[in-house]
């Protein structure tokens, strides 16, 4: 029997199964679901509830619960519609804490309101779940019991730190943080908070406060894939931990500040930073801020500003949403896709039909193939999510098609996917028609073959290094060595100075409001501090040629983050015609850098023994072609050769 995410009940004996089934009547066809009414009671009292079928579009006011299943073997019995019903211990504790002692509570809880033994109903209800959470008057996030009695400390710390940062930023700027997100990265308003006051966070973040925050963000709830949709669609969200509660906005705002306030990162320590920069970061950036609706995110700045900035700078598509799923857990791997069907991007505007319907009779390979085919009808951006880290992925006879991503697998060794700000094939700007064909395991598409990979360096592996900045700067030096060797063979075609083009390549030309000259100056500053020999022998002279000056610390620091962000897990390369780029870890000489019409970034293809057929190695950054320049040059015969790429 297939499991349904975190809400499937374990198998039980036939007698108990028949008793549980008796509480469900088959739902009418259409948009019907069940609501649960919890009888009033105190925390320590037994829990009783009733189920009632309701038409979703005419439902009375109700709340919805978001929670983690917990230990599937620790089951408890409640009375539901007059009959016993088994639920998890964690769910029972949550329901006991959120119910009123004087008024009935009307609420939707997936494990109880869906008949878990009926596969067809489960699929249908999953298709409705986005709407169910969106229509709820409030989504209650049940985190768990407060056994150490630290929940109130954690929640008050969130409120205090968030308030202090916003007050300090406003005081420093002598005006509120800007809400015009189109001209500059909004986070710069908070970057330097506390920079000139070493003890700014001392009174707010003692050992007890930091331990309580670590306990908060390590709750299993934060790693569960379904929470992305459940909370993201909420008009209002409240987190409950034991008997304490807080506006969920405070939890998300602290995640945001941990990413952009440098001094806060220092104070909370590396363990909590690692936790926050994992699944919580991807939830905030890729999902909660991308719904484009009047959710809790849009209630006030600065998260409202973050959502505006993302929507104005990025091409938000369903691929961006699915990317986050790899960082989360689901007991059923199908839910890495199904958990996002309630997101607006799962329903293309031109069709108004969902990209697919939940079907728990499919196996994982069938689902991945099906979603790839469906995504290809919109664009080829899903190809950036392919993560090949072993040569067997490209050489084994048993390997799946190289162009189909594994949506349920994330590798820490793989580089991050970056595509949402580019338009290499001019798909976004000109709405160019594509000629994409899928036959069996083969993806065939019109392409421009730009160049062949010539030289490459080693993979940058800086994530677990003791001195990662030193490792980065040594790696920069090896990149420059490759440029020097390549220049001896073929001069690069870039019109800007060598150092400026080099620095732009190393940050994916993603400057967050900085000029290319500022990026080059920041690169020089970082190397002067962490690789002074290389700076003195090479970069000082190059910087004088460019007439660039150093940049203030916050911007230089930001560039350093960008460099580590984009280069880790990648190789620097040059091509036979002298161009540069950053490619996937399995990149090798002889690979082809190509633009596939329908993809917003260039891709690396590997020729096979069968002429005209290729394996997809991964995405790349190819300097000077990321915004459609290559297509324009190809149209006048100055760059690239048009071919039909058959990828398998």
Image: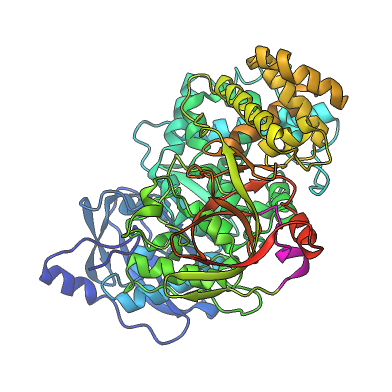
Q: Position of residue 452 (x, y in %)?
A: 61, 49
* Residue drawn at point x = 60 percent, y = 26 percent: 478
Quick check: 413 left or right of 317?
A: left
Q: Left or right: where does residue 302 sit relative to residue 2?
A: right
- 221 or 429, which lies in front? 429
Magenta segment includes 421: yes
Magenta segment main secondary structure: loop
Residue 371 in sight from this viewpoint: yes
Q: Is residue 25 left or right of residue 625?
A: left
Classify the position of the C terminus by image quarter: bottom left
- Residue at the image position 43 percent from the left and 48 percent from the top: 410
User: Which of 379/167 is in front?
Assistant: 379
Whether residue 39 appears in magenta in the rendering, the answer is no
Q: How is the image coloured?
A: rainbow
- As drawn, 137 above or below 488: below
Whole-percent x and y of residue 614? 49, 61
Residue located 84% across and 41% down the image: 495
Task: Name the spot of residue 84 as percent of width and height, x first.
Answer: 21, 66
Depth order, front residue of 407/453:
453
Q: Nearer the viewer, residue 435 or 377?
A: 435
- x and y percentages locating residue 235 in the rendered image: 60, 59
Residue drawn at 77 percent across, 32 percent down: 498
The quadrant of the image that shows the N terminus is bottom left
Number of numbered discs: 0
What is the span of residues highlighted in magenta in the rendered image? 420-432
Residue at the front extreme of this rendering? 489
Q: Is residue 153 visible?
A: no
- Look at the picture and state if 208 lies above or below 43: above
């Amino acid at each position: 029997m297939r499991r349904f995410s975190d809400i499937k009940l374990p198998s039980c004996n036939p007698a108990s199964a028949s008793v549980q089934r008796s509480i469900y009547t088959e739902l009418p066809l259409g948009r019907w679901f069940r609501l649960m009414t919890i009888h009033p009671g105190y925390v320590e009292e037994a829990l009783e509830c009733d189920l009632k079928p309701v038409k979703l579009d005419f439902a009375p006011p109700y709340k919805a619960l978001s929670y983690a299943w917990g230990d599937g073997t620790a089951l408890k019995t409640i009375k539901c519609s007059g009959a016993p019903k088994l639920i998890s211990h964690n769910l029972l504790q949550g329901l006991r804490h959120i119910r009123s002692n004087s008024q009935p509570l009307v609420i939707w809880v997936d494990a109880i309101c869906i008949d878990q033994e009926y596969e067809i109903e489960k699929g249908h209800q999953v298709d409705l779940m986005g709407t169910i959470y969106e229509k709820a008057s409030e989504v209650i996030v049940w985190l768990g019991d407060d056994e150490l009695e630290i929940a109130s400390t954690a929640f008050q710390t969130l409120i205090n730190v968030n308030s202090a940062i916003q007050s300090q930023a406003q005081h420093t700027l002598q005006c509120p943080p800007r809400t015009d997100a189109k001209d500059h990265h909004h986070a710069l308003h908070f970057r330097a908070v506390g920079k000139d006051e070493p003890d700014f966070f001392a009174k707010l973040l003692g050992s007890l406060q930091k331990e309580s925050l670590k306990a908060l963000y390590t709750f299993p709830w934060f790693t569960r894939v379904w929470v992305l949709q459940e909370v993201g669609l909420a008009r209002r969200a409240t987190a409950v931990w034991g008997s304490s509660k807080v506006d969920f906005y405070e939890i998300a705002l602290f995640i945001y500040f941990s990413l952009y306030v440098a001094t806060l990162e220092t104070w909370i320590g590396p363990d909590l930073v690692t936790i926050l920069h994992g699944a919580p970061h991807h939830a905030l950036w890729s999902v909660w801020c991308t719904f484009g609706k009047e959710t809790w995110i849009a209630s006030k700045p600065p998260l409202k500003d973050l959502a505006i900035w993302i929507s104005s700078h990025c091409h938000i598509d369903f691929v961006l949403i699915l990317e986050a799923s790899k960082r989360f857990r689901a007991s059923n791997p199908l839910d890495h896709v199904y958990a996002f069907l309630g997101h607006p991007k799962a329903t293309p505007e031109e069709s108004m039909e969902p990209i697919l319907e939940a079907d728990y009779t499919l196996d994982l390979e069938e689902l991945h193939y099906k979603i790839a085919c469906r995504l290809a009808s919109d664009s080829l951006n899903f190809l950036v999510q392919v993560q090949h880290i072993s040569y067997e992925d490209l050489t084994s006879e048993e390997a799946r098609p190289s162009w189909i991503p594994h949506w349920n697998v994330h590798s820490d060794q793989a580089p991050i996917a970056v595509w949402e700000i580019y338009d290499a094939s001019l798909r976004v700007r000109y709405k160019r028609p594509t000629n994409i064909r899928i036959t069996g395991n083969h993806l065939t598409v019109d392409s421009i073959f730009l160049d062949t990979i010539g030289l490459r360096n080693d993979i940058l592996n800086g994530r677990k290094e003791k001195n990662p900045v030193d490792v980065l700067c040594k790696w920069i030096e090896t990149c420059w060595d490759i440029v020097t060797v390549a220049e001896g063979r073929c001069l690069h075609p870039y019109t800007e100075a060598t150092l400026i083009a080099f620095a732009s390549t190393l940050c994916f030309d993603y400057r967050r409001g900085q000029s290319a000259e500022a990026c080059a100056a920041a690169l020089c500053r970082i190397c002067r501090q962490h690789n002074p020999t290389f700076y003195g022998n090479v970069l000082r002279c190059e910087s004088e040629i460019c007439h660039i000056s150093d940049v203030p610390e916050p911007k230089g620091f930001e560039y350093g983050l960008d460099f580590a962000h984009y280069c880790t897990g990648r190789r620097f390369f040059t091509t036979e015609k002298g161009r540069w780029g950053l490619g996937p870890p399995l990149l090798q000489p002889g690979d082809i850098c190509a633009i596939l019409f329908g993809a917003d970034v260039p891709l690396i293809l590997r020729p096979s023994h069968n002429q005209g057929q290729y394996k997809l190695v991964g995405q790349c950054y190819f300097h000077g072609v990321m915004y459609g320049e290559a297509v324009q040059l190809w149209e006048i015969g100055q760059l690239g050769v048009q071919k039909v790429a058959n990828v398998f």
